[in-house]
Amino acid sequence: MIAVVAQSDPGRERKYRMIVPDKLVTQVYEWAREAGAVMFIDIQTGHDDIRTILPRFEWLLKNPDVHLAMDPEFNMIKSGRKPGTKIGTYDAADVNYASGFLVELVKKYHLPPKVFIVHRFTRNMVTNARSIVVHPECRSS
């Protein structure tokens, strides 16, 4: 489920993203559980920072069957452009923050390893990629 959706309109907060209401996220999670499926929440930050967005989803990510995906193509902080007009980027520091956040959840809630996906279809979408740290508590893809 795309829990934070990049938008072409800046919105009230001028962040070019829409956070899906928790009620809808909960409903989709319940459907996944009923089906015996795992759930991935996908984050498209627009002009927001992953460090601001990710902590608000601890309530969901603390479940052992919920994992994380990030979309660098919709992170437009560096370029200042509207999402969808250019391919955005994350730096390894952003990826390391997110994986570190997941590692802390695994330890705090005694969870099995989390799956962490960073959608990367061009080399430049993740800068300094060689600096990405891989943790056993977080299986990256």
Image (tube, rainbow, N blue to C red):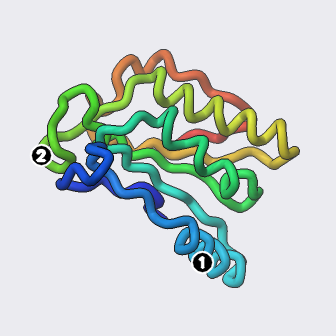
Q: Residues within 10 Å of mark 2 (few under 14, many from 20)?
A: few
User: Which callout, 1 or 2, points at the residue further toward the start of the chain?
Assistant: 1
Q: Mark 1 points at which residue?
A: 27
The amino acid type of the residue labelled 1 equals Gln
* Front one among 82 and 86: 82
Q: Distance between the residues labelled 1 and 2?
A: 32 Å
Amino acid identity at mark 2: Thr
- Image coordinates of residue 81 in percent, x first then y, are 15, 37
Q: Is residue 48 left or right of residue 28?
A: left
Residue annotated with mark 2? 85
In the displayed orientation, state which residue is furthest to the right.
110
Left/right placement of residue 31 relative to residue 89 reads right
107 over 23 or under it: above or below:
above
Q: Which residue is drawn at 30% across and 43% down?
A: 15
**Disc 1 or disc 2, which is closer to the eye?**
1
Q: Residues within 10 Å of mark 1 (few under 14, many from 20)?
A: few
Query: Residue sitting at 37 percent across and 30 percent down?
Result: 90
Could you say whether the residue bearing mark 2 is in a helix, strand or loop? loop
Circles 1, 2 touching at the beta carbon (< 8 Å): no
Residue at 87%, 44% in the rendered image: 110
Q: Position of residue 134 (x, y in %)?
A: 62, 27
Residue 28: x, y in percent? 57, 75
Residue 74 visible within the image: no
Q: In this view, does 139 lie to the left or right of 124?
A: right
Number of numbered discs overlaid on the protein picture? 2
